[in-house]
Image (spheres, rainbow, N blue to C red):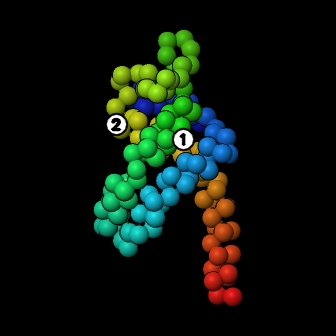
Amino acid sequence: MDIEINGIAYQTHQLNAMKQFHIMRRIAPLLQGFLAAPNPEAFFGAVTEAISKIPEADCDYVMHTCLAAVTRYSGDRWAPVFARQTIVFDDIDLAGLLKLVSTVITENLSGFFRGGVAKLVPAAAATKTA
């Protein structure tokens, strides 16, 4: 997927299924935070509380894995954004970092949430009532 942030071109790439799974399980508390918000006013509080409870090692895994799937057009070539456990470009700020990570997550997990979860939830509900 192509994305532009602050006039700079980036490309996000597909993660393998195992990495997708490990990202999904690490952000599960965040997804629960989304679901815990009873109304739009409570959404921000529920999400920030959920983020605060995710262990730092899990946050690092998600960020590192997602950033490793991003390249940036630099000069005349595409270059990795993340290498040797560090962000290569000093001009990527927190907003840009979160945009890149969320783009990779969306690109890699949206198919599961569109089809997979919808198929799992009714099956789980039917199992509980049986």
Q: Are marks 1 and 2 in contact (CB under 8 Å)?
A: no
Q: Residues within 10 Å of mark 2 (few under 14, many from 20)?
A: few
> Who's the residue at 47% across and 31% down the image?
4
* Residue 124 seen by the camera: yes
Among the two numbered marks 1 and 2 on one chain, the one whose residue lies closer to the N terminus:
2
> Who's the residue at 50% across and 23% down the image?
83
Across and down, in percent, residue 107 comes to 59, 44
Number of residue marks: 2
In this picture, is 66 found above or below 130? above
Identify the mark at residue 104; answer none if there is no mark: 1
* Residue 101 seen by the camera: no
Marks 1/2: CA distance?
A: 15 Å
> Who's the residue at 67% across and 61% down the image?
115
Disc 2 marks which residue?
94
In this picture, is 15 found above or below 119? above
Identify the mark at residue 17; answer none if there is no mark: none
Across and down, in percent, residue 91 comes to 35, 24
Q: Amino acid at mark 2?
A: Leu
Across and down, in percent, residue 39 comes to 36, 71
Secondary structure under the numbered disc 2 in the rendered image: helix
Q: Nearer the viewer, residue 78 or 67?
A: 67
Q: Nearer the viewer, residue 92 or 23?
A: 23
Side of 107 relative to 47 (left or right): right
In this picture, is 58 found above or below 100? below
Q: Nearer the viewer, residue 49 or 109?
A: 49
Secondary structure under the numbered disc 1 in the rendered image: helix
